[in-house]
Image: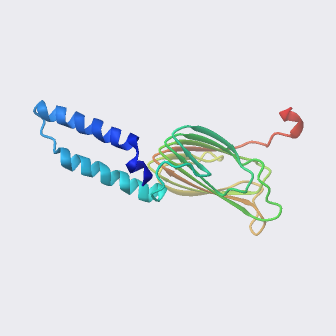
């Protein structure tokens, strides 16, 4: 809850209260106290749901209020894009030794996930008030969908991507990983 004690939070509160007081002076009867407490409870609720009272602190895999590009190597298994945009490149994940699970949460944001068509992959997408497009052109707005590429075989190691989309957009595309000599 460190954000509640920050100057940004209290600055926003003072500005909102000022606007409400001006509107009240103009004849609009707005219950300022109830609005303040309502906004505070909404913020605390969002903190509980999405950040577990972590506020706006930086944590690995959390992308907030900006544009981010990540080349994943499989060591980190969770990515969250909140109020921004993210490009998560999973084309170099190695699944020879074991199945690799990556979880992507996309809230009020835009996200691209890049997959290598040569890596066996299964993607489970859930969406609420959002839009998620898989490589087979399936569009998920509400509910869930499972995509499996042509290399996926039941019982063999694979890349498992679990993607959650809430009030956001997600596009999953397949592209081959660039070769070492192409990067030069």
The image quadrant that residue 45 belongs to is bottom left
96 relative to 104 in the view: left or right: right
Residue 148 position (above or below residue 28): below
168 vs 63, nearest the viewer: 63
Color style of the picture: rainbow
Q: Residue at x 39, y 49 (%)?
A: 5
Q: Residue at x 52, y 49 (%)?
A: 57
Drawn side of residue 36 relative to residue 150, left or right: left
The quarter of the rendered structure image containing the N terminus is bottom left
User: In front here: 1 or 135?
Assistant: 1
Number of labelled discs?
0
Point out the residue furthest to the right here.
181
Q: How far across and down, in percent of the image, does residue 52 sit?
A: 47, 59
**Where in the figure is residue 63, as x and y percent of width and height?**
57, 45
- x and y percent of residue 81 in the render? 55, 46
User: Is 140 on the left or on the right of 152, as rendered?
Assistant: left
Residue depicted at x 33% and y 52%? 42
Nearer to the camera, 57 or 39: 57
If the image is split into quadrants, where does the C terminus sit?
A: top right
Which residue is more in the foreground, 174 or 39? 39
* Residue at the farthest bottom position: 155
The extreme left residue here reads 27
**In the image as oriented, which residue stretches furthest toward the top?**
26
Q: Position of residue 108 (x, y in %)?
A: 47, 44
Residue name at image x 83 percent, y 61 percent: 96
- Position of 63 compared to 92: left or right? left
């Amino acid at each position: 809850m460190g954000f509640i004690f920050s100057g940004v939070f209290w600055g926003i509160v003072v500005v909102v209260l000022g606007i409400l007081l001006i509107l009240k002076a103009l004849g609009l009867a707005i219950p300022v106290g109830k609005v303040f407490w309502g906004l505070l409870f909404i913020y605390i609720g969002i903190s509980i749901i999405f950040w577990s009272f972590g506020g706006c602190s930086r944590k690995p895999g959390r992308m907030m209020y900006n544009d981010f590009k990540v080349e994943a190597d499989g060591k980190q298994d969770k990515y969250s894009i909140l109020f921004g945009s993210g490009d998560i490149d999973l084309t170099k994940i190695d699944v020879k030794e074991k199945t690799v699970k990556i979880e992507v949460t996309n809230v009020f944001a835009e996200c691209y996930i890049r997959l290598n068509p040569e890596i066996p992959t299964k993607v489970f997408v859930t969406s609420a008030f959002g839009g998620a497009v898989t490589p087979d052109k399936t569009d998920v707005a509400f509910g869930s969908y499972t995509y499996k590429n042509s290399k996926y075989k039941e019982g063999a190691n694979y890349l498992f991507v679990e993607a959650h989309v809430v009030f956001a957009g997600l596009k999953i595309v397949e592209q081959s990983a660039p070769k070492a000599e192409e990067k030069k």
